[in-house]
Amino acid sequence: MLAVISPAKKMDFKPVEGLNSSTPDFVSDANTLAKHARKLSVSDLRAMMKISEDLAKLNRERFQAFSESPDDRATKQAAFAFAGDTYMGLQAANLSTDDLAYAQEHLRILSGLYGVLRPLDRIQPYRLEMGRKLATKSGNTLYAYWNDRIGAALDHAADGVIVNLASNEYFKAAGKKMASRVITPAFKEEREDGLKMIGLFAKKARGAMARFIVQNRIETVDGLKDFNTDGYGFRTDLSGENDWVFSRVTPRA
């Protein structure tokens, strides 16, 4: 079983000591895409990413500094470098060495720049969302650039079952020709006016489920139904064959 999550726009590159590390499988593709992105001006990046001028300047600086042979001080393990809501749920810093070794085999992070990442793959700072347009010889989008290679890489690692904890924007890059069974959990809040999916809570729950899979060594689909972190529970009455619903009464602050 393989869990798949999205990256985060927010990054944290404060150094972490004592971790193993690995090299991304698609590092040469990341170098190619970074070369294309390096040609973009601040105005180009603002328009493409719909971000402020300050963020556009930051990301242009990142692409200008992107190196084909970075030293360890310029990189960080992916699960520790991303710092968004999903990674608050994953809590990689609190995983044991054995947990991280298991995650290295059973967790993948999708990336517009790196394609597919293992948790301990060293990456450089960047921002390049999968849904953005970036012209290459393969076409005008990152979906065209990656074609079916992301889906093939996930199939190869999945052993038959993928737990899709990524956003639609990112998992779309896996394509529709996958051989694996894909289970897509949805996390909803029980409110007086019905079940609601709240973005912040759902993202954190995706990371928490990835953590649950890793810490409990979940390798069967039935084991996944035992997920109960932060009060969530599996809803048989609302779940289909592969689209599963987990709900909870939102805890009071």
Image (cartoon, rainbow, N blue to C red):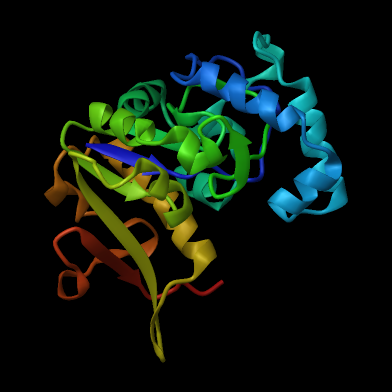
Side (left or right) of 226 relative to 20: left
Q: Height in image: 77 above or below 135? A: above
Query: Looking at the image, can residue 103 be seen?
Result: yes
Residue at point 15%, 48% (across, down): 221
Across and down, in percent, residue 232 comes to 33, 64
Side (left or right) of 205 relative to 155: right
Residue at point 72%, 21% (across, down): 66
Query: Looking at the image, can residue 125 be seen?
Result: no
Residue at point 47%, 39% (across, down): 144
Side (left or right) of 12 relative to 156: right
Instruction: State which quadrant residue 71 falls in.
Output: top right
Across and down, in percent, residue 142 comes to 53, 40
Viewer-side residue, 166 vs 103 = 166
Q: Height in image: 106 above or below 200? A: above
Viewer-side residue, 217 vs 35 = 35
Where, quadrant-wise, is the N terminus in this rendering?
A: top left
Q: Height in image: 196 above or below 33? A: below
Side (left or right) of 135 relative to 215: right
Residue at point 76%, 53% (across, down): 47
Which residue occupies the extreme bottom position in the image?
193
Where, quadrant-wise, is the C terminus in this rendering?
A: bottom right
